Amino acid sequence: MTLYNLLGALNTLFIMVSVLGVYSQLGTIWRRKQMVSKTERPTALLSLNQFTVSFFAYLSFFIYGYSIEPFNHYIVWPRLLAAMLVMGILFEIWQDRKSRAARVSVVLAGACLILAGAGLVLGKTIADQSRYIATLLIVLVSVFIAQGYYHQIRLILKAGQTGAVDLKMSQFILLMDISTIAFALSMGVKEGWPLLTLAITSAITKLIIMYLFRWVNVSNVAARRRQQYTSA
């Protein structure tokens, strides 16, 4: 087995672990829905911005994986599953908040998922175009994911609590990011730099989110903000 195949298989394993993390976040929302609390919404403090960007991060990898040669099964199928689960989270946010922004995110995500699936079916007919689109999308998503998680981080800092944010999701996705960095390096910088860019950006944001779970438990500032948030 070559280093490429070894790291590809390892990356697939950790992507599936990250998928479990996304599913854990979805499960957290479902459990909170059963609580039926007027003060604690099922999707409290979940950033619509961040999850919309996360969806497009997974989707861009999905497109990139089927548009390069050879077809990269290690990238394609796990990312498709993850994108579908994140779309489920977007749907739950829309159901909970009934906002125009949430509705637009769900509709846009659904339309893009259908178009990406059409690109997979058409295969080599639009392979070059798909690769250019995916590369551009990954670069843009790298910028937006930094902005999206910055928004999520600000929400936690402002409220002094993590709300419906699920720690396991950040932990599992961080493992995926680390393995993706190794896999991208095995592909060569010329071929793997889009994956490398996004994975490094994502890993940094997950480390910050994980630190904030400790911060809300030990910081006096977090305690004061939490009290102000619940009494507002």
Image: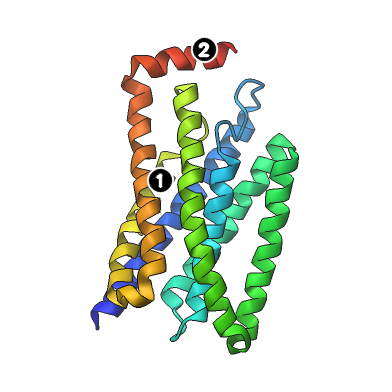
Q: In the rendered image of this protein, does residue 171 appear above or below residue 216?
A: below
Left or right? Give the position of 124 relative to 64: right
Checking the image for residue 228, the label placed there is: 2
First in sequence: mark 1 vs mark 2: 1
Q: Residues within 10 Å of mark 2 (few under 14, many from 20)?
A: few
Checking the image for residue 21, the label placed there is: none
For the rendered model, the colour scheme is: rainbow
Q: Secondary structure at mark 1?
A: helix
Q: Quadrant where the C terminus lies?
A: top right
Determine which residue is flagged by label 1.
170
Q: Quadrant of the rendered structure where residue 85 is? A: bottom right
| Spatial CA span between label 1 and label 2 | 26 Å
Q: Which amino acid type is shown beneath numbered disc 2?
A: Gln
Q: Residue at x 40, y 52 (%)?
A: 202
Q: Nearer the viewer, residue 154 or 162?
A: 154
Q: Which amino acid type is shown beneath numbered disc 1?
A: Ser
Q: Quadrant of the rendered structure where residue 115 is? A: bottom right
Q: Quadrant where the N terminus lies?
A: bottom left
Q: Secondary structure at mark 2?
A: helix
